[in-house]
Image: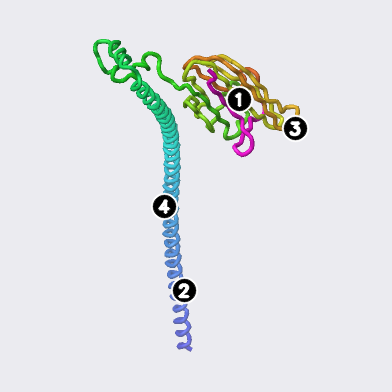
Amino acid sequence: MGNLSRVGLFCCLLFVEVGVCLSLGDESFLQVLMRKFHEQDEKISAIEAITKLDHKELVNKILRLEEMLKYSDYKQKTLEKRIENMDKIIKELEIRTHTKNEENLIDEHFHGKHEQENSNSKPVADSFFRTTDVGGDQSAAANPMRKRILNGGVYPTHVAFYAYLSKPEKLPGLHHTLIFDTLITNVGASYNHHDGVFTAPVSGVYVFNWNIYSSFNGDIFTELMVNSDKKGGARSDSHTVGEDHNSTHSIIVEISQGDIVFIRTHATISSSGNIISSPTTYQSSFSGWLLK
């Protein structure tokens, strides 16, 4: 009986100690778990902070890239503008070179013709140039062509041109110069197909003709100008009919050397529709020649 009591007491004490140990063990585990949670929270907060910094840096990079793209677009537009201006300069130089070459050909032609005439003439002609040279300079005498140019010029006696529009002129406005850009004939090289202007190389009586086709339901008013003076007018009216119409007008006019002649739309009466022209069908054209 005494032994049983001792065993029961030992068991009670053992259970109490185990309970105490278990209680202490549970408390340490909770502390460790809480510490782990705290550490995890700190890691998550650090990751969030890094993510925010990365996002801000990414946004700044995107903004910088957008600015660089805008600047690149600006530089591209600037370069395109420069190229466009250079193309215009090149075209102007080509026109000037072409005109200069034509002038040189004309000068060479008439210079050669004059030299041939001079070689068949009497010696008194050469004596005349020598005696009229001021200050004894023989350069003018050695170049009779130069002398004749200074005294009024040597210019072609045959002048004629014909040109037409290579494509339609859409909805032309008031006092709009028509540029007949396809050149077929240009005897004397006096018509410029780049600006549509004929420049009289010599004074005289000229015949000018222009032919204008108006589009379906169009009504086109044109006039021929000598310098700033209107010398003739024409109307091509398809406004009241369902088809294309054309008008042809001719004038005979006396003009002076250096006068310019061109075709333009009316200065005050508005046209409607398009001026039509095509190399494969029919052409709106401008022509002229020296009559006398």
Q: Which numbered mark, 1 or 3, is in the foreground of this view?
A: 1
- Expressed as whole percent of the image width and height from the top left, the position of residue 104 reads 38, 27
In this rendered view, identify the residue nearer to me: 211 or 3. 211
Amino acid found under the numbered disc labelled 1: Trp
Residues shaded magenta: 272-292
- Expressed as whole percent of the image width and height from the top left, the position of residue 99 reads 43, 28
Element type where label 4 sits in the image: helix
Quick one: label 3 or label 4, which is nearer the N terminus? 4
Find out whether residue 140 is within the magenta segment.
no
State the mark number for residue 210: 1
Q: How far apart are labels 1 and 4 at the CA level?
A: 80 Å
Asked if marks 2 and 4 touch (Cβ < 8 Å), the reply is no
The crowding category of the residue bearing disc 3, from other C-alpha atoms within 10 Å (few below 14, some 14 to 19, many at least 20), is few
Image check: 148 left or right of 216? left
> Mark 2 — residue?
19
The crowding category of the residue bearing disc 4, from other C-alpha atoms within 10 Å (few below 14, some 14 to 19, many at least 20), is few
Give residue 276's quadrant in the image: top right
Q: Residue at x 43, y 75 (%)?
A: 17
Quick one: label 1 or label 2, which is nearer the N terminus? 2
Amino acid found under the numbered disc labelled 3: Gly
Element type where label 3 sits in the image: loop
Q: Residue at x 35, y 19 (%)?
A: 121
Give residue 134's quadrant in the image: top left
> Mark 3 — residue?
242
Q: Residue at x 42, y 57 (%)?
A: 43
Vertical placement of residue 36 versus 84, above or below: below
In this rendered view, identify the residue nearer to me: 38 or 253. 253
Q: Which numbered mark, 3 or 2, is in the foreground of this view?
A: 3
> Mark 4 — residue?
50
Asked if marks 3 and 4 touch (Cβ < 8 Å), the reply is no
Quick one: label 3 or label 2, which is nearer the N terminus? 2
Quick one: label 1 or label 3, which is nearer the N terminus? 1
